[in-house]
Every structure is written in structure tokens, then in C-alpha cells.
């Protein structure tokens, strides 16, 4: 199996998938996720995870882990973030 490239510009479904995973895994709380998502929705020049890290809600290590999990989900679904999101 080959690596799937992440689509550029930022993929909305990919960002939602990341948010869902970090919340479901207990990496961030609901309030922190809602705050970061609100900020991200107003400024999509950087990923949701960056807002979470900047506010101290997500550690850099957990961000790396979450990014790897998102990457694996995308691999499982041929790079289709919407399908990956629907599967979780």
C-alpha cells in the first residue's frame, strides 16, 4: 500500500476527524475543543490542532500521535477524509 498525500488546502473533514479523535481519546476536554474549533473556524490558515496546542489543551506529543492516527485513518479509506470521519 502506498502513502496517501493529505489534500491541500486544509480539508475540513480531516480537521473534524482530528477534533473527534482527540476528544474521544480524552486528549482534550469539550470546552477546550469547542473554543479551539471556534477560533479555527474564523482562521483556517492553520490546523485545528495548532489552536489546541497554542492554548495548552493538547501537548505536542499528543498532537503528533493524533496526526499519526488521522494519517492511518486516511490510509484505511484511500485518502477520503469524509469516509474516514464516517467510520469513527
Image: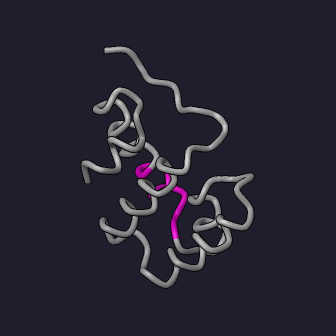
What residue is shown at x 41% (from left), y 50% (from top)?
Answer: 65
Magenta-span inclusion, residue 47: no
User: Residue 73, image x and y in percent?
Assistant: 33, 40
Report the side of 36 relative to 29 (left or right).
right
- Using the image as rendered, state which of residue 28 and residue 86 is in the foreground: 86
- Say how many tags the image has: 0
Q: How is the image coloured?
A: one colour
Where is 77 relative to 69, above or below?
above
- Using the image as rendered, state which of residue 74 and residue 25 is in the foreground: 74
Magenta stretch: dominant secondary structure:
helix
Residue occupying the far left of the picture: 87
Where is 70 relative to 1, above or below?
below
What residue is shown at x 35% (from left), y 50% (from top)?
Answer: 85
Quadrant showing the N terminus = top left
User: Residue 88, image x and y in percent?
Assistant: 26, 54
User: Residue 75, image x and y in percent?
Assistant: 34, 30
Report the side of 43 relative to 40 (left or right).
right
Q: Over which residues does the magenta segment extend? A: 58-66
Could you say which quadrant of the image residue 49 lies in?
bottom right
Magenta-span inclusion, residue 62: yes
Where is 6 relative to 11, above or below?
above
What residue is shown at x 42% (from left), y 20% (from top)?
Answer: 3
- Using the image as rendered, state which of residue 59 and residue 42 is in the foreground: 42
User: Residue 67, image x and y in percent?
Assistant: 46, 46
Could you say which quadrant of the image residue 53 lies in?
bottom right
Residue occupying the far top of the picture: 1
Amino acid at each position: 500500500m502506498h502513502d496517501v498525500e493529505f489534500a491541500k488546502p486544509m480539508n475540513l473533514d480531516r480537521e473534524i476527524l482530528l477534533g473527534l479523535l482527540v476528544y474521544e481519546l480524552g486528549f482534550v476536554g469539550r470546552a477546550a475543543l469547542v473554543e479551539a474549533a471556534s477560533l479555527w473556524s474564523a482562521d483556517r490558515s492553520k490546523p485545528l490542532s495548532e489552536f489546541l496546542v497554542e492554548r495548552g489543551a493538547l501537548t505536542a506529543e499528543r498532537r503528533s500521535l493524533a496526526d499519526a492516527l488521522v494519517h492511518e485513518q486516511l490510509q484505511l479509506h484511500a485518502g477520503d477524509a469524509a469516509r474516514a470521519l464516517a467510520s469513527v
